Structures are given as structure tokens and as C-alpha cells.
Image: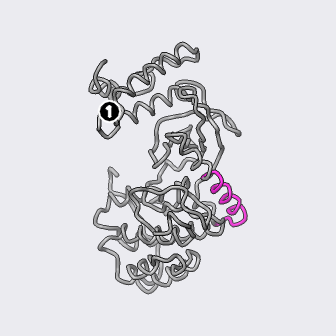
Amino acid sequence: MNTAREAADTIAAADRPEDLFGSAATDSAARQAARRRYHRLAALVHPDRTGGSGTAFHRLNDFYRQWMSGSAGDPIAGYCGAHPIGPLHARGSVADLYRSGSDAVLKIPRTTAANRLLAGERNALGDLSDLAAREPWLRPYFPQLRDTVDHLDTGTGQTRTVNVLGALTEGFVTLAQVRAAYPGGLDPRDYAWMHRRLLRCLAGAALAGWVHTAVVPENVLIHPRLHGVVLAGWSFATRPGRPAAATLRAAAGPPELTVAVAPETDVFQAHRLMLAMLGDRAPAPMRAFATGCLQPEPRLRPAAADLLDEFDDLLDRLYGQRRFRPFDLPKGQ
């Protein structure tokens, strides 16, 4: 094939890595042939050349990584065992998540520049796990770090920092999916339980000495049926007093992100998220509650732990005695 269109069509038609690179092989000649084919296709569909979205390029990278690193070859070896690389589960801001069996996912950075971010996630999740061992009420709110891998990618010769996380794939959805399902805003009584649990997440993070710095819809997972909430996406986690390890282009502010974050940075982001999730359905008292947490100076914002009782008081005034509300996403979401 000689054109970008032909290459893109070939990549789109592939259902598995073997469709592009042939049967699984461990001999060096077959791997060199696959590498040559990868580079030839990548040169044709690279977004710098095509000016497009890069969909074909990213799909090609996914297939090549799977073929070279796991699903068409040997599993990658961690400290606690070997981990097969299964199908792509989700694409994050700096890393991709692949299913690994039924109870784990592999978080693999797309570039080696993101290795430091996944190393930071390891440290944050390790501290959160230690805290949850002492404070068991915190355990459900954070991903579980199962294993770590420093994996040599034989296709590029580069080492990738891979985190093996407990699978949060069955029954969980992101708040981004919830917002897409309810574009007019959630019923505040439904968002109430999500926000209460998110405040608990943030109180735990502050107690462990970490700032998440990326409390956005894509990183908040909920289990609609069980009313579970997990704060995922700890790659940007940062110690208080330092600039954020990285920032999301699409998420504006708060102003201290590039200077010195604090636990109140997460409080700001959580209440901006509340207003986005509720939209025009936010009652005036709840909107005022959120606005009070959006002060430009971190020292003027309340701590997450202090907000727990305040938010419960607000809900009591708005809705009276608390009762369980079943929550479902529309079919097809």
C-alpha cells in the first residue's frame, strides 16, 4: 500500500493484532518484520502527515503494543506474577487501560514521558492503601494497586512504567457517561449521594497527604446500582505545596495548579464538577454551597472533611429524611 487512505482502511478492517502483523511469534525475524510493517503503516497514517484526528494511528499503536507485549505473545511480568494484555478498556489522558483477565486492568503510558506520572500514581495509591488499612471506611473509594511492572517494549527498546490495578469494569461508569445520559442535568437528589462519597474520597486523599488535581468527570467512577463511588486517574497526583504533576488542557483552573496545589484544589474541582453535573437543575442553596468552595484563594475554601457534615445539613434542609433512591442510566448508555 502506498497511500494514507489504503493504510487507514487496512487498519480499520483489522479486528485483532494478528490481522496486521501475522501469527504470534517469538523469533527475532518475525518480530523484525512486524516492526518494519508497523513503521511503514505509522508513517502513512501519522496525524502530522494526514492532519486528521489520529484515530488510525492510535489504533495501529494499540494493535502493535498488544502483538509485541502480550495478547499475541508472552504476558508481561510484574513483581506479583505475569499479566496478559487483553483488549483496550479505556483511553485516559496519558495512558491506556487494557483488561488483564477478569479482575485487573493494565495502565500503560502511551509515551515514556508519562512514566513519571504513573510512578507518582504508584506512590499515591500505595499511601492510600496504607491509610485504608488503618481506616477501613476509605477502602471502597480508591483503585487498588495490584502490581507494578517496568516493562521493556521490544518494539521500541523503551521501558514503560505499567501499573496493574484492580478491575473496575463491571457495573461502573464514569460521570462523563452519566452527564452524556442526562444532558439537561441530574436530579440533585441523585447527585447528592455521588457528591457525599466524593467528599469522602477527597477527605481521605488529604489525610494521606496527596492532592488528586484532576477531579473531572472521566476520573469519577460510579456504580449506579450499588451507589459506589471510586476516584480513579491518580497519574497527576501531587504532594501539597508543589505544582501539579501535569494538567489537563480541557480543565481550566483553579489558579494554583501551576504554582502550589493544596487539598482545597480538589475541593474547588469537585464543586465545579457538581455545578456541571446539575446544570440548571441545581437548587439555589446547593448552587450557593458549591460557589462558596470556588474561592480563588485556596485558604478561603473549606476542607473536604469539614464539608461532610455541612453537606448533610444542606440535604436535610432541602429534602428532609434521607432515603435510598435507585439510580439507573438510560438503556444504551
Position of 149 with respect to 36 (left or right) is right
Residue 237 figure quarter = bottom right
* Residue 136 drawn in magenta: yes
Position of 324 with respect to 78 (left or right) is left
Position of 41 with respect to 258 (left or right) is left
Where is 161 relative to 240, above or below?
A: above
Expressed as whole percent of the image width and height from the top left, the position of residue 100 reads 56, 38
Q: Is residue 231 or residue 53 the one in the foreground?
A: 53
Where is 152 relative to 163, above or below?
A: above
Q: List the residue tagged with mark 1.
A: 49
Colouring of the image: one colour
* Residue 126 drawn in magenta: yes
Amino acid type of the residue tagged 1 in the rendering: Arg
Name the residue at the right extreme. Answer: 134
> How many labels sit on residues?
1
Q: Is residue 133 or residue 68 the one in the foreground?
A: 68
Residue shown at 35% from the left, 38% from the top = 54
- Quadrant occupied by the N terminus: top left
SS assignment for the magenta stretch, majority: helix
Name the residue at the front extreme. Answer: 259
Where is 207 relative to 248, above or below?
A: below
Residue shown at 41% from the left, 67% from the top = 273
- Dot 1 lies on which element? helix
Instruction: Specify start and end residues of the magenta stretch as a single range.
Output: 121-137
Expressed as whole percent of the image width and height from the top left, the position of residue 86 reads 51, 34
Residue 51 figure quarter = top left
Residue shown at 34% from the left, 36% from the top = 47
Circle 1 crowding by C-alpha within 10 Å: few under 14, some 14–19, many from 20: few
